[in-house]
Amino acid sequence: MPDDPMGSETQPDPSDGTATVTVSPPPEPEREERNGDEPRDGDVVGLKSALRTERSSRRDAEKELTDARTRLKEFEDRDKTELERVVTERDELRGQLTKLQTDSLKKQIATEVGMAELWEWLQGESAQQLRANAVKLREQMGGPQPTDGGARQVGGPPEAVSMDDRIRRAAGRG
């Protein structure tokens, strides 16, 4: 077997008339030496191509997941009565309304405290908790104290200011 890829050899054993087979592993392919982690041009192109393929696969999988969820909901809803469907929809809408109201309150409090861009970071279930969290966040970040330019004091009720009052203040008369 001269063309054996494993490189086995058969040798006769003179003492008892049997043959001994020795198998050597195939030779390893030669590898190029690389300096550190420097990518070669082919590696970068291959990585970019793999990344594009992975992103495309992810988008396809997300679309399939959305479609499957829609089909599942339709399947679950097929046996419901009209009343059950309306109740389910109402509950979903209430959840959305609660989230929108909470987000609105967070934005309002964050603006009052002078941290409008960080409203999503506020945590709490009541206005007092949200306000305390906003003040604490501002202090930890070393943010500026709110100015009188339309922002009210933390914890106080909103101050109604008419245009006439603003003009008087600007002129130093009130």
Image (tube, rainbow, N blue to C red):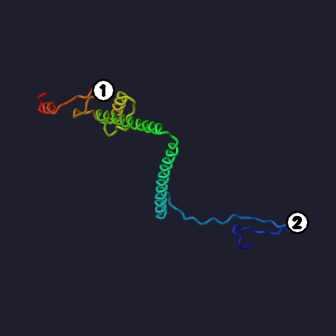
Amino acid type, residue under disc 2 in the picture: Asp
Q: Which quadrant of the figure has residue 104?
A: top left
* Residue carrying label 2: 16
Residue drawn 34% across the image and 32% down it = 134
Residue drawn 39% across the image and 33% down it = 123
Label 1: state its secondary structure.
loop
Amino acid type, residue under disc 1 in the picture: Gly
Could you say where residue 39 lies in the image, as x and y percent from the top left? Answer: 48, 60
Q: How crowded is mark 1: few (under 14 residues within 10 Å), some or many (20 or more)?
A: few
Q: Nearer the viewer, residue 51 or 138?
A: 51
Q: Residues within 10 Å of mark 2 (few under 14, many from 20)?
A: few
Q: Which quadrant of the figure has residue 138?
A: top left
Quadrant of the frame with the N terminus: bottom right
From the viewer's perspective, tell me whether residue 53 is left or right of residue 31: left
Q: Which of 66 and 5 is in front in this view?
A: 66
* Residue carrying label 1: 155
